[in-house]
Image (spheres, rainbow, N blue to C red):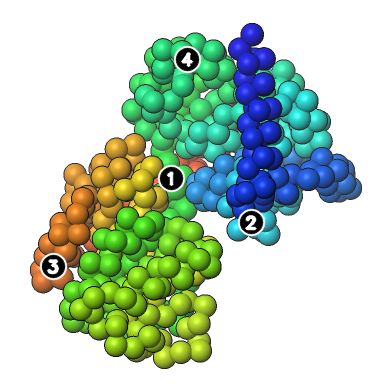
Amino acid sequence: MMNSIYSVSIFLYGLGIRVAAWFRPKARQWVRGRKGLFTRLAGDLQARESAWNGTVWFHCASLGEFEQGRPVMEHFREQYPAYRIVLTFYSPSGYDVRQNYPGADFIFYLPLDTPANARKLIRLIKPNLVFFIKYEYWFNILRELRLQRIPVFIISAVFHRDQPFFRWYGTWFRKQLANISWFFLQNDGSMKLAETTGIRQFTVTGDTRFDRVGMISDQPRSFPGIERFAGNAMVFLGGSTWEPDEAMLLTLVKKDWPGMKFIIAPHEVHASRIEDLENKLLSAHHSPLTTHHSLVIRYSSLDRNDAAAARVLIIDTIGILAYLYRYASFALVGGGFGSGIHNILEAAAFGKPVFFGPRYGKFTEARELLGAGGAFCVNTPEELEQIVSKLVHDPEALSSASAVCRNYVESNRGATRRIVQGIRNLGFIGPPA
């Protein structure tokens, strides 16, 4: 009964997205990306099938989950080069950015999770192993994988009490967890919740994001235009920001901070969003920004302007933010005034004290860095200004917070190795070639 209700709800969800596609660009992308999907899958996958010894399928919801799964993909490719890697995305925001990612052999959208689509998808991919990232649970696909005895793993898995598995109506949802061959959990809190469901197929291996951000900080990229902009100034970087986060930053920008510059990388970079942010910065009252337009500059126009003369740099592209924290003295990561903070580990990996809003409770790294003194929750612009002022005028405090962040990331690396080793130890795959 519940299987049918779930499948009907998925069908209605897909119908709703198609209606929304008439009005919303993201929904339109979602629909367009799936047109002719199975034809493309059949043509691409079957044409080169004989060139590989097997297939490993990774599925990510979006860009953040891709970065979480990426270390395992790349480690697996290194250990097992004879397997082809198929990567699927649910969201356009992930697919659009990583559709040319060289670490996967084939990259597609995930079709709507109906029973027929699940059977057709698995028949075409023919995976030997399947990895879903963090908390992607598509129950028709998972059920079909188990029926076909294909091992499926959730890596960097995390459980929260507000998930359906732990609610009063969660009996059916909890039963679906038996379709997962093994969970590689992030932390002990998730382990304790998993135990309440009766499942036992799990190991606590940590969060692969630590490995990914550690790799980025180990091999930093250089951006000459940003280096010209930053010069010898202290840089305050706002990463993955939304409007409430930018309102906090705008208060700082209005102040006279000698020798400080600002980089703002909004979470969304469509034209109207960038233009609105630029106008707010230019109209800041009692600010040097009102004296000359060139004091606010876009990343896309760095080479056509005097980058060194600018005070605020707006990042109007995607895919580079994680590398930019190397240029910051401290950072504010967005999302804390909305549904939840974005990835603060990218800043911490470079040893940057990190600020965020009050919606951080679901994020273990935020709670632990707060407790250790490497992160700061700010509710008002005044709180932000007060803490920044302390760090600016107390080099020892800044150095201490930086060390906390860097050491925290370094001490939590290793989940990728533990996951791949765990799959071998459990007998799901043999030793590497």
Residue occupying the point 69% across, 40% down: 18
Q: Is residue 230 left or right of residue 320?
A: left
**Of callouts 1 and 4, which one flags the residue occurring earlier in the amino acid sequence?**
4
Let me know if residue 374 appears in the view. yes
Label drawn at residue 147: none
Q: Quadrant of residue 14 in the image?
A: top right
Label drawn at residue 170: 4
Q: Which residue is mark 1?
A: 414
Q: Is residue 118 left or right of residue 256?
A: right
**Of callouts 3 and 1, which one flags the residue occurring earlier in the amino acid sequence?**
3
SS state under label 3: helix
Q: Quick check: 345 above or below 423?
A: below
| CA gap, disc 2 and disc 1 | 29 Å
* Callouts 2 and 1 close, C-beta under 8 Å: no
Identify the amino acid type marked 1: Gly
Q: Which residue is mark 2?
A: 96
SS state under label 1: loop
* Callouts 4 and 3 close, C-beta under 8 Å: no
| CA gap, disc 2 and disc 3 | 39 Å
Identify the amino acid type marked 3: Ser
Q: Which residue is mark 3?
A: 389
Instruction: Residue 147: give x, y in percent of width and height.
Output: 72, 18
* Callouts 1 and 4 close, C-beta under 8 Å: no
